[in-house]
Amino acid sequence: MKRIEVVLILILMTFGLLQAETKLTMELWNRWTYQMNDGEVIKNEMALKRSYFRIEPKFSENIKGRFNLDFFSDDGEIDINDSTAVNTGNGVGLKLKYAYVDFGNMLPIKDSKITVGLMQTYFGTIYEWSYPTIEGDPSDKYKFVSSTDFGFGISGKIPNSFGSYALAVYNGEGYKKVGDNINTDMNYAANLRVTPIAGVTFGGSYMFRSENDSDDDNREECNLIAGIGKFAFGPFNLLAEYLYKIKSLPNANPEKDNKKSSVITIIPVYKITDKIELLARYDIYDPDIEADDDIENTIIAGFNYFIMQDAKNKPKLFIQTNYQLTQYETDNKKDVQEILVQLRWIFSETINKN
């Protein structure tokens, strides 16, 4: 079913290229990474970490599509605190990141849209994350949810610019391992944002996620909650986010096997000029709230330098520089320090067939 869905979306995209206004975009991330583990250098590399190719056809004022290919450096999975770990990466990888169509104003609800396909996961900040730091969104970094998934959703704006909402149903497989972790139960998400006054936004998300069918002995269920606050006053912006997860094995011993995890993220950004902004980030990750000495703290400090911007003041060519320190309370893991310097560049072209 999923393959049929992707093929249909690709047909629509191709038709859009021939008949409609279409935007083509390419974004590349060239990155230098210098990493130390307890004072010992374990990585010093230059790499093309990400490369996105995006097609956005506009069939009409109310029907639009998006198709993304994600090219990335495939470094494999390595435990930097395990001296016997082996890098299993293949050097390069390719994933389908987005493939969906938006149908606007199809419902008797103003400013609403229906989305079908490989689409955003409406949870926390992951669906709108723009990488102010080189490190990814907290939900992605700490493996709470995947940034995209195959599904169906309804979203829109609350009248008078009071906020936004989204309701969605997903397979639960994400996009990195297509066909993995699919069962007879769908995953559900609800997201709400409220802007009571200009510059202040509050919101929250709920998601139910499951792995394996209801009668499977290894059935796993996760209830996830996100709370966010955004504050923007003049040159200063602040993002605060709290993530909470309860994971249970209902066919085993629910009381014994429940596991609770949490993340607190705070990101202040100060724009010195239109070209330079300073930023910091502080993450507190607790993988098991009831366990002792397992908290992971990450501190990031850096700046973004915007070399070129477009007519709408959006970055086209910019440099990101981050210093990152990850500290572990457990004695089994050593602190990790990283220096990351990244050149991001974006170029696009709109083709109008009319």
Image (cartoon, grey):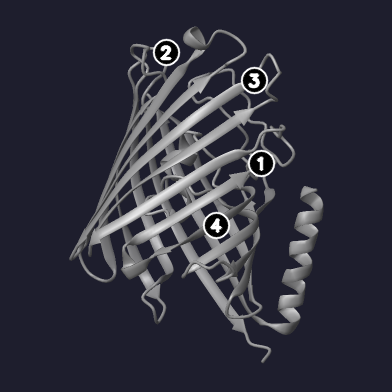
Write down the residue under mark 1.
171
Q: Please indicate, yes or no, whether residue 205 appears anywhere in the rendered image.
A: yes
Q: Amino acid at mark 2?
A: Asn
Mark 2 and mark 1 lie on one chain; the one further toward the N terminus is 1
14 in relation to 287, above or below? below
Residue 114 horizontal side relative to residue 117, left or right: left
Could you tell me which residue is drawn at 51 percent across and 34 percent down?
143
Q: Position of residue 171 (x, y in %)?
A: 66, 41
Q: CA distance from mark 2 to mark 4?
A: 45 Å
Q: Residues within 10 Å of mark 4 (few under 14, many from 20)?
A: some
Q: Which mark is residue 154?
A: 4
Q: Position of residue 6 (x, y in %)?
A: 76, 56
Could you tell me which residue is drawn at 65 percent across and 60 percent down?
100
Choose between 337 and 67: the one closer to the eye.
67
Q: Nearer the viewer, mark 3 or mark 2?
A: 3
Choose between 12 and 336: the one closer to the eye.
12
Quadrant of the image containing the C terminus: bottom right
Q: CA distance from mark 2 to mark 1?
A: 36 Å
Mark 2 and mark 4 lie on one chain; the one further toward the N terminus is 4
Write down the residue under mark 2.
332
Residue 39 horizontal side relative to residue 15, left or right: left
Write down the residue under mark 3.
219
Kindly state the secondary structure of the residue where label 2 is placed.
Answer: loop
Residue 247 horizontal side relative to residue 1, left or right: left
